[in-house]
Image (spheres, rainbow, N blue to C red):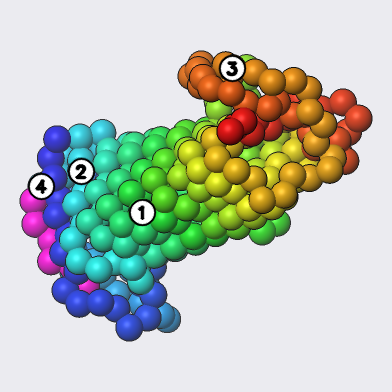
Amino acid sequence: MAEVKLKLKKKTKFPLEADTITPDNFAGKTLNEIKKLPLYHAKELVTIGDFFDVSGKAEDIANTKIIIDGDVSNVKRIGEKMTGGEVIINSDVGMHVGNTMYGGKIIVKGNADDWAGAMLQGGELEIEGNAGHYVGSAYRGFWQGMKNGVIRVKGKVGNESMLWAKSSKPANKWPTLYCGSANSFLGLHNHGGTMVVEGDVDRCIGADQVRGTIVIKGKISRLLPSFKKIDDVTEITLPNGEVITGKFAQYSGDHSVSKETAGRLYIAIK
């Protein structure tokens, strides 16, 4: 796979809008052409070459890997709408990383700010640290958020992650989040998303859930009263075919939405 290396020249004073940093936009371009791709720094139109040293070579989308060095914690929208290839970020990263991406893979070797993987349509986003609020969620005004793909966060995700997630059985699309722990309102308005949490979660998990699967391997601070216990299970089969074993209490809900619901919440029995 061909590699294009970007090294930030200095940390930006204002957030840098970098939606052009994707394998799609780099594919088939020379280094000079890549350097001329536009970015926004506050209200100013700038270029990649103004803020990054650029080296390496790009090929087609599927065979282009972008490696980013330097502190890009104030750089937004890296990997936006990408359809293939790979992006590796060797630091913390700013807001909206991988939002509305359709394919390919992004690896963040640090923390990610808010809206990571927002409205993900496919591909894989991996964050080795923590992530901010609204991971994989729908933007304000939208009723459908993450529809496919996988987000993996080794640390903690913030409030309202996987808001309005929606699956499609006929299209074999199963939006899935794996994370270490989670703040409040994980899976809010869930319409088929799958969430697996290795540790603890805060309150109101699965609020307004119509369908979908939430698995909590740690503790939950407060279970909504609109969830009803069904039974105890020792095996959970996720929609993507993965099987999780252990002792779990199985709940249906959220029954505040409907008397009958396909939503399921599993909480580990310690």
The secondary structure type at the circle numbered 3 is strand
How busy is the neighbourhood of tag 4: few (under 14 within 10 Å), some, or many (20 plus)?
many
Sequence-first tag of 4 and 1:
4
Q: State the residue in front, 191 or 267.
A: 267
State the residue at coordinates (29%, 78%): 12
State the residue at coordinates (66%, 51%): 221
In the image, taking residue 26 as reference, residue 246 lies left or right, namely right
Q: State the residue in front, 143 or 109.
A: 109
Sequence-first tag of 2 and 3:
2
Vertical relation: 1 (above or below) 45:
above
User: Which residue bears the numbered disc 3?
Assistant: 234
How far from the left and from the top, in percent, is residue 80? 41, 52
Amino acid found under the numbered disc labelled 3: Thr
Q: Are marks 1 and 3 in contact (CB under 8 Å)?
A: no
Amino acid found under the numbered disc labelled 2: Lys
Instruction: Locate residue 68: give its quadrant.
Output: bottom left
User: Which residue bears the numbered disc 1?
Assistant: 129
